[in-house]
Image (cartoon, rainbow, N blue to C red):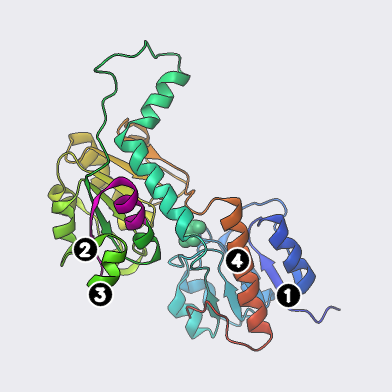
Amino acid sequence: MSSKPRILVTRRWPAAVEQVLAERFDVTLNEGDVPMTAEGLADALRTYDAVLPTVSDRLPAELFAGGLRAKILGNYGVGYNHIDVAAARAAKIVVTNTPGVLTDCTADIAMTLLLAVARRAGEGERQVRAGEWTGWRPTHMIGSKVTGKTLGIIGFGRIGKVMAKRCHFGFDMDVVFYNRSRIDPAEASRYGARQLDTVEDVLRASDFVSLHCPGGGENRHLINAERLALMKPGAYLINTARGDVIDEAALVAALESGVIRGAGLDVFEAEPNVPERLRRLENVVLLPHLGSATEETRVAMGMKVVVNVTAFFEGREPPDRVA
Ligand code: DGY
């Protein structure tokens, strides 16, 4: 019998990372890449030393009850609001995440959505593909200029800062932000940004609002009907953070009635289900949670998990421990 820790990987990971895991651990891979059920995850916590979930696995409090074998959850992703961290901590299970390595690529997807929705790229692409384009004309598919506009950022962590940098230094945008804690103005100005006191101040001031705060907890439905009504009528909302930061039903109503002009969304409240009313709208760009989906980033995320889990089983503190 192997003396290596028994590890379960809940989904397919990049081959290079799976190979390293297989060399170091007694690993069970999910070769079919089939999402695990709640019972499957509960069983994994009872039978493996480590479970390596992704952001699409739900690990609520009830999964942590009873006698568990697992000692660590090496989460593949920076967000961990899908894990009841308090329950994991109570069950003496360490939780780690993968910060830092997906900052650029997530900001790039936010930028992609911002440009695509402002310049109607999704609509235009659909028109060309459908063979419905009748040719250039001065009034065809008029969008909104991006350069020089005001960007409002909610959550000035790693990704928010990089988004600010891209927009200020790349697109001459005035950048304002809301962050729960105060950021040194000198630090903010390195990213071409300035802090405002409230979420409401940012919403009122901005032509584009981009969300970069964690999901869950008090951020659930941070953007609700009342706050959407504070945005400029011509403004756009971009979400690459977590679906539950926006009250999706309120957003659909705001988009349908013209309270705001458009939205670019990479995340949704009940992924992978996207409401039909949202899918019917032309003034939205919808992506299937692609923020970190580059070869470089997905390998780097996996390698971070390897480092965290290896440190744990060698008796060292995992570098990205969150619980
Ligand atoms: C994360 O890591 O939290 C992203 O949402 C997926 O990469």
Per the rendering, the mark at residue 41 is 4
Q: Is residue 153 magenta?
A: no
User: Is the residue 174 above or below the residue 119 in the image?
Assistant: below
Q: Rounded to the nearest whole Å, what is the CA distance between mark 2 and mark 4?
A: 44 Å
Q: Nearer the viewer, mark 4 or mark 1?
A: 1
Q: Position of residue 1 (x, y in %)?
A: 86, 79
Residue 6's disc is 1
Viewed as shown, does residue 272 lie left or right of 284? right
Between disc 4 and disc 3, the foreground one is 3
- In percent of width and height, residue 228 lies at 18, 49
Work out whether mark 2 precedes mark 1 in sequence or the reverse, and give the earlier one: 1
Identify the residue at the far right of this view.
Answer: 1
Q: CA gap, disc 4 to disc 3? A: 43 Å
Q: In terms of secondary structure, where does tag 2 sit?
A: strand
Q: In this rendering, does residue 29 appear at all? A: no
The one nearer the camera, 65 or 288, is: 288
Residues rendered magenta in the picture? 163-179
Name the residue type under label 1.
Arg
User: Of discs 2 and 1, which sits in the foreground?
Assistant: 2
Residue farthest toward the bottom in the current orientation of the protein: 315
Of the residues shown, which amino acid type is indicated by label 4? Leu
The crowd level at tag 3 (other Cα within 10 Å; few <14, some 14-19, many 20+) is few
State the separation of the CA atoms marked 4 and 1.
14 Å
Tell me the tag on residue 184. Answer: 3
Residue bearing the label numbered 2: 194
Q: Secondary structure at mark 3?
A: loop
Above or below residue 121? Residue 253 is: below
**Dots 1, 3 in contact, CB < 8 A:** no
